[in-house]
């Protein structure tokens, strides 16, 4: 689902803007009909007390979010052993800000913003309040075509080409979903409802949060969806236990005693 579309920025570098438009198009084609994913383009996030930075794309899903920079990496870039970035422009080396380090601050400030408004963004589940502390915030950086990054100070798997963008997001989503069913019944897995996803999207866009216009969520924090089974065909009913999950620890398991059989003497 696309909540905020991409808008061309004439003031940006033509090469970086072309890469950004390509990434936005791929996100739209992949997720425009997907109700479990929300896509936002061009969201301003505080970097420090005085400045804000533009996050080119934000993808919100039920297990967290992915922030994407698609305008920074273009041309010929060199990274030295100190992790300092520079871009070659007409034979001159121009120092540029390290986008990987910058997005670490963006991720931290984004989490802080969400935490400060947690009461309006996350619904309570069985009386308890979720938190954003363990919400995954992944970062991806799109490298423009015909660009290069050289140097000993670069070794980051989050720098990809636009062709691999949606595949990387789907792979991350599948990994979190798989973890939910593997680790202690999903007790340590961050997961939110669609209602919370829409609330986060409106909050980041600066819109008013209107829960009445979002998909409804049940007490377990999951979005409810009712579908009638076709007449004349069998329907499958999904039941959910209301009993608490009980974890059996190894130290509580005691060996069983064999029953002695009486033998005739």
Image (cartoon, grey):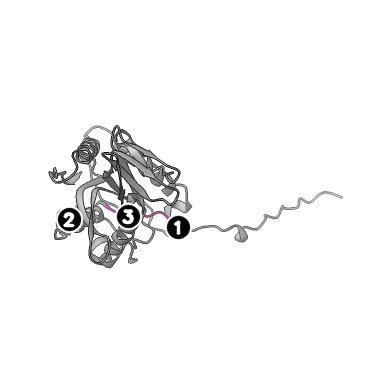
Lower sequence index among marks 3 and 1: 3
| Label 1 sits on residue | 245
Residue 90 seen in render: yes
* Image-based side of 261 in relation to 184, left or right: right
Segment colored magenta: 188-193
* Image-based side of 133 in relation to 152, left or right: left
Q: CA distance from mark 1 to mark 2?
A: 37 Å
Nearest the eye: 226 or 23 = 23
Q: CA distance from mark 3 to mark 1?
A: 41 Å
Quadrant of residue 178 within the rendered picture: top left
Q: Main secondary structure of the magenta part?
A: loop
| Label 2 sits on residue | 205
Residue 239 seen in render: no
Whole-percent x, y for residue 189 in the image: 40, 54
Asked if residue 47 is among those painted magenta in the image, a careful observer would answer no
Whole-percent x, y for residue 96 in the image: 30, 50
């Amino acid at each position: 689902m696309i909540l905020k579309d991409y808008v061309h920025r004439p003031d940006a570098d033509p090469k970086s803007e072309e890469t950004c438009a390509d990434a936005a198009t791929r996100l739209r084609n992949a997720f425009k009909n997907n109700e479990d994913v929300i896509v936002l383009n061009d969201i301003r996030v505080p970097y420090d007390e005085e400045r804000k930075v533009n996050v080119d794309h934000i993808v919100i899903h039920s297990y967290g979010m992915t922030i994407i920079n698609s305008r920074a990496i273009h041309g010929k870039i060199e990274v030295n052993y100190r992790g300092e970035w520079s871009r070659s422009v007409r034979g001159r080396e121009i120092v540029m800000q390290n986008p990987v380090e910058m997005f670490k601050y963006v991720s931290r400030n984004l989490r802080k913003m969400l935490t400060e408004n947690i009461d309006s963004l996350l619904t309570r589940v069985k009386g308890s309040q979720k938190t954003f502390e363990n919400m995954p915030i992944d970062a991806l950086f799109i490298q423009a075509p015909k660009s290069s990054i050289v140097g000993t100070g670069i070794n980051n798997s989050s720098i990809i080409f636009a062709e691999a963008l949606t595949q990387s997001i789907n792979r991350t989503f599948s990994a979190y979903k798989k973890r939910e069913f593997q680790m202690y019944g999903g007790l340590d897995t961050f997961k939110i409802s669609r209602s919370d996803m829409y609330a986060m999207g409106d909050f980041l866009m600066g819109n008013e949060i209107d829960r009445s216009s979002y998909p409804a969520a049940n007490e377990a924090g999951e979005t409810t969806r009712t579908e009638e089974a076709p007449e004349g065909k069998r329907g499958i009913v999904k039941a959910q236990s209301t009993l608490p999950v009980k974890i059996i620890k190894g130290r509580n398991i005691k060996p069983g005693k064999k029953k002695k059989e009486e033998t005739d003497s």
